[in-house]
């Protein structure tokens, strides 16, 4: 049975974390376009086996893995740096044991040190627009009361 796994993409690497507690006999085999992972996990020595045909090529010699008590993190060196992987697998099929690690995910494609992302440029533009920072906005009468407004009446049915 496959171990559950999370993955995320970076400019030069793809990371896959196999979530197996108390793993033993960990075996990770990196090939140019395939990753094979196996181990025994948990107190019942459950055998896990994951075979992944990768979306793109990796450098097997520069890829590595690290085992902790909670998981095994694999770091795959991309064959072509700077190329985004929209998914981990070659096929589009949804694997129920594989998910995106949104805690570590970031859209690095648009980012570079000298070029701010669009959102940063937009935020900066918004901050530079319009007058004084210390202006008090006027209180809006009736904003907090629950009285009925003139536009709260029932709408006619559509025909």
Image (spheres, helix red, strand yellow):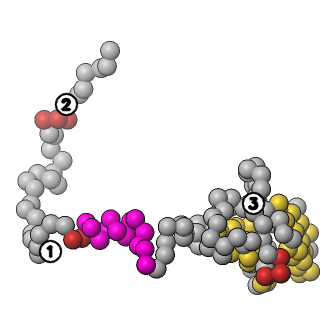
For residue 18, what is the image quadrant? bottom right
Q: Secondary structure at mark 3?
A: loop
Q: Position of residue 35 (x, y in %)?
A: 84, 68
Q: Is residue 110 above or below residue 75?
A: above
Mark pair 2, 1: CA separation: 39 Å
Q: Position of residue 16 (x, y in %)?
A: 73, 71
Q: Is residue 113 rendered to the left or right of residue 92?
A: left
What range of the chain is rendered magenta?
114-126
Q: Which residue is mark 1?
A: 133
Give the label on residue 153, or none.
Answer: 2
Q: Position of residue 59 (x, y in %)?
A: 79, 75
In depth, the one of 4 and 55 nearer the eye is 55
Q: Residue at x 74, y 71 (%)?
A: 79
Q: Residue at x 58, y 69 (%)?
A: 105
Q: Is residue 64 above or below residue 20?
A: below
Q: Earlier in the sequence, mark 3 or mark 2?
A: 3
Q: Indicate which label's residue lies in the foreground, 2 or 1.
A: 1
Q: Secondary structure at mark 2?
A: loop
Q: Local crowd at mark 3 within 10 Å, few (<14), some, or many (≥20)? A: some
Q: Is residue 154 visible?
A: yes
In the image, residue 115 lies in the stretch drawn in magenta:
yes
Q: Which residue is mark 3?
A: 55
In depth, the one of 103 and 87 nearer the eye is 87
Q: Residue at x 88, y 79 (%)?
A: 26
In depth, the one of 84 and 88 nearer the eye is 84
Q: Is residue 124 rendered to the left or right of residue 25?
A: left
Q: Earlier in the sequence, mark 1 or mark 3?
A: 3
For residue 122, what is the image quadrant? bottom left
């Amino acid at each position: 049975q496959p171990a559950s796994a999370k993955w995320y993409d970076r400019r030069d690497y793809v990371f896959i974390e196999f979530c197996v507690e108390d793993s033993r006999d960990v075996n990770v085999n990196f090939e140019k376009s395939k990753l094979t992972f196996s181990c025994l996990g948990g107190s019942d020595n459950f055998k896990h086996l994951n075979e992944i045909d990768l979306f793109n090529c990796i450098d097997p010699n520069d890829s590595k893995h690290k085992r902790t008590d909670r998981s095994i993190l694999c770091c795959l060196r991309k064959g072509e740096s700077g190329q985004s992987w929209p998914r981990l697998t070659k096929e589009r099929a949804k694997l129920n044991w594989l998910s995106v690690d949104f805690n570590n995910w970031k859209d690095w494609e648009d980012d570079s040190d000298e070029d701010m992302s669009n959102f940063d440029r937009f935020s900066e533009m918004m901050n530079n627009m319009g007058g004084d920072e210390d202006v008090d906005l006027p209180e809006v009468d009736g904003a907090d009361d629950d009285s009925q407004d003139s536009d709260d009446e029932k709408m006619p049915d559509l025909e």
